[in-house]
Structure formats: C-alpha cells, structure tokens
Image (spheres, coloured by chain):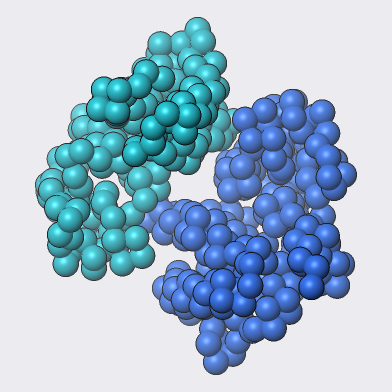
Amino acid sequence: MATDDVKLIGSWASVFVMRARIALHLKSISYEFLQETFGSKSELLLKSNPVHKKMPVLIHADKPVCESNIIVQYIDEAWTSSGPSILPSHPYDRAIARFWAAYIDDQWFISLRSILTAQGEEEKNAAIAQVEERTEILEKAFIDCSKGKPFFNGDHIGYLDIALGSFLGWWRVVELDANHKFLDETKAPSLAKWAERFCDDPAVKPIMPEITKLAEFARKLFPKPQA
Amino acid sequence: MAERSDSEEVKLLGMWASPFSRRIEIALTLKGVSYEFSEEDITNKSSLLLQLNPVYKMIPVLVHNGKPISEPLVILEYIDETWRDNPILPQDPYERAMARFWAKFVDEQIYVTAMKVVGKIGEERDAVVEATRDLLMFLEKELVGKDFFGGRSLGFVDIVATLVAFWLMRTEEIVGVKV
C-alpha cells in the first residue's frame, strides 16, 4: 500500500492523543507526530480544528479529522485491510462499545478530573466517591463485554480498551495525588488485571507516558493553592 | 424496501417532546423498519426503562429482539449498520468522520449551550443567544452549496440537526428570542 501522508497533532501527555496513537500503532501506520508546545496552540492546530481548537487532530492527505474517538473509528475504517479490526464486527457489540466509550468521556472522566480540580477535602472526597461508583460500573461493563476474554474487545485490544486504557497513566497520577487506590484487586479485580495486560500490549507500551513525568506535568497543569 | 424477517422485534421507548427520541423515529421510518413505540412519562419512569437503561435511566432506548441500546447517536449508528437500505451515514471514511463530528457538535455544543437560555434574563440571556448563534454559524458553513448536510438527501447530521430545525425554533417561540 502506498505511504499515505499522515500527521498527528498532539502531546505526549494527552489521553486523547494517546487513543489516536494506539490506533495508528495497531494498524502499523507511519505518521509524523507534531507535538504542541505546552501553553500555546500552533497555527496548524487552530487551522485544522477551528471549532474546538483542541488536540488530537489527525491529518490524512491534508484532510483533518478531530475528536479522539472519531479519529480511532476513522483509522479503523480508512485502513480496513491493515492490522486487526479496532471495533467489534457485530452491530450490537459495536453499539455497546460506543455506549461505554461515551460513558467514559461524559461521566467517568469528568469525575476523575474533579479530583484534581477539587477545592478542599470535602469536594475531593465527594469526587473520589463518585469515581469509585463509576469504576464499579465499568468493572461490570468489562465482565459483560469481555465474556471471559482478556480485553473489552475480546482476544485483542480494541475501541473500548483504547478509550479507557489511554487514561491509565493519568489514573495512576490521580491515585497518587489523592492517596487512594481505585484499580484495586478487591474493588475492581477484573479491571486491575486488564490494566496490566493493556499497558503490556506492544501497541501501547512504547507510548504510555512515565508516571513520574506525568505527575510532574500534572503539578504544572493543576497547581495546588498556596498553603 | 427494508428486509425484515417475521421474527424481528423492534421497540422504541421514547417521548413525544424529545428531539433525541424523534430522531430515532425518523431513522427507523427512513429505513422502513416497523417498530412498537412506547411513550414514557419522564416524571414517572417505567420499571422497564429503568431496567433497560440502568446507567442513564433516560429515553430513547431501542430494543431489538430483546437487546437494549441507549444513547441517541449510538442508536442511530446501530440502526444504520443493522438495516442497510437507505444509508444514513456516508460510505467514505472521511465523510463518516465529518458526519460524526457535526452530530456530536449539535448534541454537545449547540444543544447544551442553547438550553442554558431557560430561566435566564437580560444580559445572561443575551450571552447565551450570542454563544448559540456563534455555534450555529459553524453549522451554517457546512450547508453551503448543499440541500442537506448529507448532500442531495437526508443523512446522519440532518437527522440529528432536526434538534436545531425544530426544537431550537420552538424554544425561540417559547422563550421569546431569535437566534
């Protein structure tokens, strides 16, 4: 297949960018990674995503695709013959995967983020409780979707694995910050084991950011108020 | 004409006033799919709804041969993939990505922003109207040179944007603003 011109605008620290990168790696697609500088937005980013002005943006043959989950589906559909299928094949399984991916972004991620932005102990504890509750929902979702197999998608990582798995670095950073474990063998045993398998996957391992580097970045992004 | 075996059972739990529920009806009708409509009282949700959508407890929920699907955009894609006549999403991967992008934009940006007008007066209301108008301008650009977002016929974004065509206009009347 001819080498298509593929660029990805992003950052090493972004969960959403990571989704796109994992998908590209799964399909063995070569791409130019254009890293944004923290604190400013490049002209290319602003031009390619005028609506949201956010990364990631995939630029394929000069055509921009925005929104991480949309990019992942695009990669799956544009390169059908390369690598494994990212979305399940059956329409019902695809619907379930899309449902949970939307839940992760609309509900679960919002609570996780609230832990980092919480003002005071009370707000933080409320956010932690909400993440606990929503993680329990995801634990059940994993058991339903995986049907005894290692990943949400079955034998190989897929759309939903990527949607949640890309958060694992940041999730660990939040656990350390809050001094609270969510991915616990007693509270979320299936997800805890899945997380290890996901991080070990060859498409994921090279791009999962180092926790210490991410924690340092988190301190810049979410500065603590002066005591 | 859509293929349908006699054992197909399609039920939609919905609500007459909901744009999210209506868009599913539009899609099913476009595809020629017969379905049983079950009107929900959202002030008194049925135990069936709570059982079929335990996460959000909201309509619409499509039930196909006993299996529930929730979330309006997820349901639309399911309908398109299950009943292949009269495609709603385009075939080209890039066009599909764009359709998904604009649909998400309508639901997450236009709808959420526009609904903030409820209960607001004066300067706050003006700010919401202006913000909604700005968002609508993005959508307006997508229609340039086309009859529909989907090109020459109704497509995914057209179905989703009935929210704008109908509900936003009704809200304008009720609230007394013009966006």
Residue at x 62%, y 77% (from the top left corner): A121
Q: In this view, does B12 lie to the left or right of A52?
A: left
- Furthest residue to the front? B122
Image-quadrant location for residue B3: top left
Image spot of residue B26 (x, y percent): 25, 32
Colour assigned to chain A in the rendering is: blue
Q: Quadrant of residue A222?
A: bottom right
Query: Where B88 falls versus A185 (above or below)?
Result: above
Decide which of B95, B115 is in the foreground and name it: B115
Q: Residue at x 62, y 30 (%)?
A: A51
Closer-to-camera residue (A59/B21): B21
Residue B120 in sight here: yes
Q: Residue at the location (76% across, 66% down)?
A: A225
Residue B171 picture quarter? top left
Q: Colour of chain B?
A: cyan
Viewer-closest of B121 and B109: B121
Residue B48 position in % (x across, y down): 17, 64
Q: Residue at x 53, y 68 (%)?
A: A152
Q: Nearer the viewer, residue A205 or B13?
A: B13
**Residue A164 showing in the rendered view:** no
Quarter of the figure that contains the C terminus of chain A: bottom right
Quarter of the picture containing the N terminus of chain A is top right
